[in-house]
Image: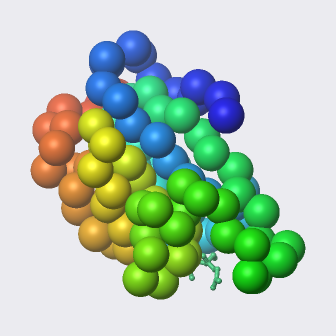
Amino acid sequence: MKQVGGHGNGEEVELLGIWFSPYVQRVVWALKIKGIDYQWVELSFRDPKNRSRSLLKHNPMTKRVPVVVHRGRPVVESLVIVEYVDETWKKPHFAF
Ligand SMILES: N[C@@H](CCC(=O)N[C@@H](CS)C(=O)NCC(=O)O)C(=O)O
């Protein structure tokens, strides 16, 4: 697990993902735009019957990524996560 991103905003955010997923990349960009530090948790989907404990705990319904865990609470579905990020952290990290 590695720390990625922004400017030390003190929030506890984890992103469960796989690097090549466009759904995950959508969330990566949302967090980047807001300058949110997060812990990256790379999962392996090689064996579909062997999902990580973290994924089963945080997204037992679909067992899909991305999942953002903010202060221990999971948010699932990439578009829902993007909306959540936008609503939770109001200011973008940089101006367009
Ligand atoms: N509608 C979901 C799609 C997420 C999705 O399909 N994720 C894929 C990775 S690209 C996944 O977790 N696949 C694992 C599986 O289907 O078992 C979203 O937008 O988050």
Position of residue 9 measured from the top left corner of the image (x, y, whole percent): 31, 18
- Towards the viewer: 62 or 11: 62
Horizontal side of residue 68 vs 25, given as left or right: left
- Towards the viewer: 58 or 30: 58
Q: Is residue 64 visible?
A: yes
Coloring scheme used: rainbow
Residue 51 image-quadrant placement: bottom right
Horizontal side of residue 71 vs 8, given as left or right: left
Residue 17 image-quadrant placement: bottom right
Task: Tell me which image quadrant ligand 1 sits in.
Answer: bottom right
Quadrant in the picture for the N terminus: top right
Total residue callouts: 0
Position of residue 95 measured from the top left corner of the image (x, y, whole percent): 30, 31
Position of residue 15 measured from the top left corner of the image (x, y, whole percent): 50, 48
- Towards the viewer: 19 or 45: 45
Horizontal side of residue 1 vs 77, given as left or right: right
Q: Residue at x 66, y 29 (%)?
A: 2
Q: Residue at x 54, y 63 (%)?
A: 55
Q: Is residue 78 visible?
A: no
Q: Residue at x 85, y 73 (%)?
A: 46
Quadrant in the picture for the C terminus: top left
Position of residue 12 measured from the top left corner of the image (x, y, whole percent): 35, 30
Image height check: is 21 above or below 91? below
Q: Residue at x 41, y 53 (%)?
A: 68
Image height check: is 74 above or below 64? above
